[in-house]
Image (cartoon, helix red, strand yellow):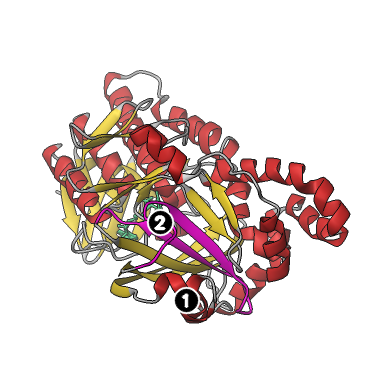
Amino acid sequence: MTKKYDLVIAGAGPSGLLAAKASGLAGLSVALLERKTDIARLDRMCGQTLVSVNDYYFDDLVYYNRQAKSIGFMKSGFSFAYDGPVQNCTAWHIYSPCGNRMPFGLPEETRKKGDSGMVGLAYDKEILLRCLLQEVQDAGVEVHAGIDVTGVETMNDGVRVSGSGKTVEGSYLIAADGTNSRIAKICGFNEGRTFYSYLLSRGSHMQNLNLPDPDILLSSICYRTPAPGFMFIFPRPYEGEYSVAFLALDPRADLEKVERFFTQESPFFSAWFTHAESTRQLASAQYMYSPVKEPYKGRVLLAGDTGSCQELENTGAMISGWKAGGAVAAAVREDSIGIASRGIADYVQWWKATYIEKCPHEAYIMNFALPYVLDTEDDLNYLFSLIKEPLPPCWNPYAAIGHIGQLMQRLLPTIQKERPAMLEKLAKMSQPMSQVLAEATRGCEPIRELQ
Ligand SMILES: Cc1cc2nc3c(=O)[nH]c(=O)nc-3n(C[C@H](O)[C@H](O)[C@H](O)COP(=O)(O)OP(=O)(O)OC[C@H]3O[C@@H](n4cnc5c(N)ncnc54)[C@H](O)[C@@H]3O)c2cc1C
């Protein structure tokens, strides 16, 4: 007879690993299925920073304990070992194409506060995944690598999960298979979600960059391709190393051209890359949907990016994974002692209150919407030229949009006087994001194969 687990988890990213640790520690029999054969290996581009360490994020405060070498979450009350290197990120600066700057924090100020001044923390995600995997195994979870989940059959009392020639059964399934989740698709969670665009990226780890500050996060926007492109530079926790990512929402923005603009053609940015050496190359291609509002049905619970727009970030994925694992552990316990069930309902309520309501996905999308609204380099250069004071230190996509909104209120009288036509463009930001990004959505149509 096939063994039936209390819980099957699909996907061993940050959310799946934390779900596995929480449920394993609670004594459940758990099978963790992962498509990659080497779970700790990073195939996909990621900035590998903790978002965000100087602010509440998903209603929690994430911290790094230098002495214990661990990462923890104060309100959710969990932590895990991380024995790799770290690098404080002391500010986030966004640049317009000609090099005008919108600074979230000034590093010369935030550095003085040491660990309390940082906005994010760079770490090595492969080491983090390795550390988490060890804790998951120590918690008694059965880990099955190299299993690409392709089938999910839900029954009254459980779930049958199959892929790569293997079938396992569990009382519950946590789908933690990321933002392109196949499980969300086959189980019908994608019905009713709005498709906005892709998030496409390519980039590499680089050395010998000549940056304005060595320890800050940098980003900028490129208008030289048929759709806007973006650049993000993340410090790495290794001397002189950075992760440089070029991104776009739709394939009309040829990412090779975006990269060429920043690294070779732009009079301002190319100076950062004169002696750059690329080491490892990474890429990603993801869907950007509106989030799943009901992350549980038919004994399948969603965790992490699986149910999110794009994205919870590693921090949010860890919190939601931990809570999802705890929710299923509670459900199994409730069932065995015969009390009314509430564990999973509590998770669903947390998801709605903490993510859907307090971290509106439209705010996240706005981080990419500015060049769709201010559609010329000149507009953006002018807007950024008006910024004379730093914004609060921040590496939180949801909070950043609030700060930018307040900045706009302060700048409105000047813009009205000097460039009234720009106000009409900026007013588009108050439209639904599906309208703001309509052009990007159309740009994705030719290669879209959704739902
Ligand atoms: C360019 C870029 C930069 C980013 N930078 C940052 C950053 O600086 N800081 C930050 O906090 N976040 C960042 N993120 C976001 C972060 O990477 C994600 O939010 C996080 O990884 C989500 O974790 P997860 O566990 O939910 O999903 P994932 O990390 O996507 O993990 C899903 C896992 O499921 C597996 N899987 C998928 N399908 C199947 C299947 N069918 N069967 C079995 N296994 C499957 C995958 O192999 C993977 O291991 C970035 C993302 C991108 C694209």
Report the residue marked by disc 1.
259
Magenta-drawn stretch contains 442: no
Left or right? Give the position of 14 relative to 101. left
Q: In the rendered structure, which amino acid carries the disc numbered 2?
A: Ile
What residue range appears in magenta? 209-238
Sooner in the amino-acid sequence: mark 2 or mark 1: 2
- In the rendered structure, the answer to whether residue 189 lies left or right of residue 135 reads right
Tag nearer the camera, 2 or 1: 1
Report the number of numbered marks. Answer: 2
Which residue is at 51% across, 60% downward?
A: 219
| Residue at x 76% of width, y 50% of height | 430
Residue 195 sits in quarter = bottom right
Mark 2, residue position: 183
Q: Mark 1, residues whose alpha carbon is within 10 Å: few (<14), some, or many (≥20)? A: many
Q: In the rendering, at what x and y percent does residue 120 appear?
A: 40, 44
- Visible in this render: residue 189? no
- Give 207 or 35, whichever is nearer the viewer: 207
Q: Secondary structure at mark 1?
A: helix
Label 2 C-beta lies within 8 Å of the nearest ligand 1 atom: yes
Task: State the image quarter where residue 379 is shown.
Answer: bottom right
